[in-house]
Image (tube, rainbow, N blue to C red):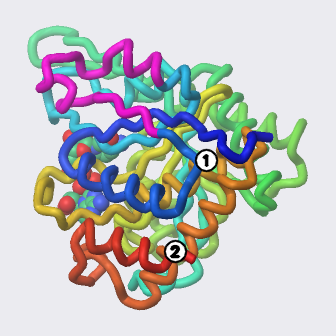
């Protein structure tokens, strides 16, 4: 338990594109809600490179290790060539093996479906994101999909423990083990074993990913917790965001045994960067997840109170139709943050 005047140090990485705009908005809301955190800002991504540093410096990595918790804006990774994704590097180096993305309808946000309440658990450290790509001969390249028993078991155990603690009913694994018999087959074997031996309390289901995606877009309300390897989890996260109103409403966390980095599912949105129109809600919701994580791991009820107040305030703003452009409204980034701040009880 923390004393009343103690604050939790949190590493803050504004990132690229819309990152600095949305992190500034979240910071203002946190300050207005008197959330007991002290930000320690560190650069990463193109912003860090342009400032003469490295994409992902040891200093930034060390700052996250020290604080144990970070809030991160999106970082740009150029398509096709250049450096390894900073997000992939960060998740691997800090061993943030579980990406968790709750996907729910919000009152006041028009969506294709009602009653969606699912959680994506994505393996964050291997699969095709191992970054092992080779030129075999002229005109032939290869990408290596890696799966290890240790990582498949670890993510399965994490997902079942999460489902149990959150009183979830069922875990569905999306896979392509009919084709990738060894790699996806290994995840299935590990998930089945963890289910059978440790968590028979949770229903367990397997679906080939193509059929799973069809079912998702027909009726996402049939799903509860989805467990996916890295690439499938990445793709299905955006798909699911589209079911409940878009990338502006889906938060996320990258969690390891010691550390946790909270970030929205969306990227740096270069098409709207610098215009003051980006929706800060997904990062704000990620910040609320972070406060709840601090409440649980540090035993500090003030974090839960701040999280509840912020959540009630953004729910109130959305229900009153105060939304940004991506959600059909007309508010800019700062005006949405102001609307939330005005509703803080
Ligand atoms: P994106 O998520 O940045 O954008 C997709 C679309 O959604 C764009 O039209 C964008 O304007 C819109 N959008 C995204 N976030 C929004 C917000 N908060 N408010 C309003 N509209 C929003 O995906 P992209 O364009 O494919 O990727 C851009 C860059 O982001 C790439 O370099 C990619 O590698 C990177 N990226 C980073 C992360 C991360 O840091 N975690 C995640 C995904 C993509």
Cα separation, mark 1 vs mark 2, equals 35 Å
* Residue drawn at the location 63% of the way across and 67% of the way down: 308
Residue 244, position as x, y percentages in the image: 44, 74
Residue 3, position as x, y percentages in the image: 75, 41
Element under label 2? loop
Badge 1 is on which residue?
Answer: 227
Badge 2 is on which residue?
Answer: 344
Whichever of callouts 1 and 2 sits on the residue coming sooner in the sequence is 1
Q: Is residue 314 magenta?
A: no
Disc 1 and disc 2 in contact, CB within 8 angstroms: no
Residue in the foreground of this view, choosing between 54 and 222: 54
Q: Can you tell which quarter of the image residue 40 is in? A: top left
Could you tell me if residue 186 is visible in this image?
Answer: no
In the displayed structure image, the side of residue 139 where residue 342 appears, left or right = right
- Residue range in magenta is 39-63
Farthest residue, direction bottom: 320
Q: Is residue 45 magenta?
A: yes
* Residue drawn at the location 24% of the way across and 53% of the way down: 21
Residue in the foreground of this view, choosing between 158 and 270: 270
Can you say which quadrant of the picture contains the N terminus?
top right
Residue 214, position as x, y percentages in the image: 46, 67
In the displayed structure image, the side of residue 172 where residue 238 appears, left or right = left
Farthest residue, direction top: 137
* Residue drawn at the location 80% of the way across and 36% of the way down: 194
């Amino acid at each position: 338990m923390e004393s009343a005047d103690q604050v939790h140090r949190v590493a803050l990485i504004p990132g690229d594109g819309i990152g600095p705009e949305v992190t500034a908005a979240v910071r203002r809301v946190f300050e207005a809600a008197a959330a007991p955190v002290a930000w320690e800002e560190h650069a990463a991504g193109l912003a860090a490179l342009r400032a003469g540093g490295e994409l992902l410096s040891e200093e930034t990595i060390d700052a996250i290790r020290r604080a144990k918790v970070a809030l991160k804006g999106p970082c740009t990774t150029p398509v096709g060539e250049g450096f390894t994704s900073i997000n992939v590097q960060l998740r691997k180096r800090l061993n943030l093996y579980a990406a968790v993305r709750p996907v729910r309808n919000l009152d006041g946000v028009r969506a294709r479906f009602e009653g969606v309440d699912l959680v994506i658990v994505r393996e964050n450290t291997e699969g095709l994101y191992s970054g092992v790509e080779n030129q075999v001969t002229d005109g032939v390249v290869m990408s290596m999909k890696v799966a290890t028993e240790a990582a498949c078991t670890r993510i399965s155990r994490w997902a079942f423990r999460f489902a149990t603690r959150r009183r979830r009913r069922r875990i569905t694994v999306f896979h392509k083990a009919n084709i990738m018999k060894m790699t996806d087959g290994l995840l299935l074997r590990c998930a089945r074993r963890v289910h059978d031996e440790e968590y028979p309390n949770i229903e367990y289901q397997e679906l080939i990913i193509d059929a799973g995606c069809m079912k998702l877009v027909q009726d996402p309300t049939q799903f509860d917790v989805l467990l996916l390897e890295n690439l499938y989890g990445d793709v299905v996260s955006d798909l699911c965001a589209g079911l409940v109103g878009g990338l502006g409403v889906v938060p996320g966390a990258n969690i390891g045994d010691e550390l946790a980095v909270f970030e929205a599912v969306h990227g740096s949105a270069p098409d709207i960067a610098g215009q003051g129109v980006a929706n800060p809600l997904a990062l704000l919701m990620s910040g609320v997840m972070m406060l709840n994580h601090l409440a649980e791991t540090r035993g500090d009820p003030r974090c839960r109170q701040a999280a509840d107040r912020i959540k009630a305030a953004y729910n109130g703003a959305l229900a009153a139709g105060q939304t940004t452009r991506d959600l059909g409204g007309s508010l800019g980034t700062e005006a949405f943050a102001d609307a939330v701040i005005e509703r803080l009880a």
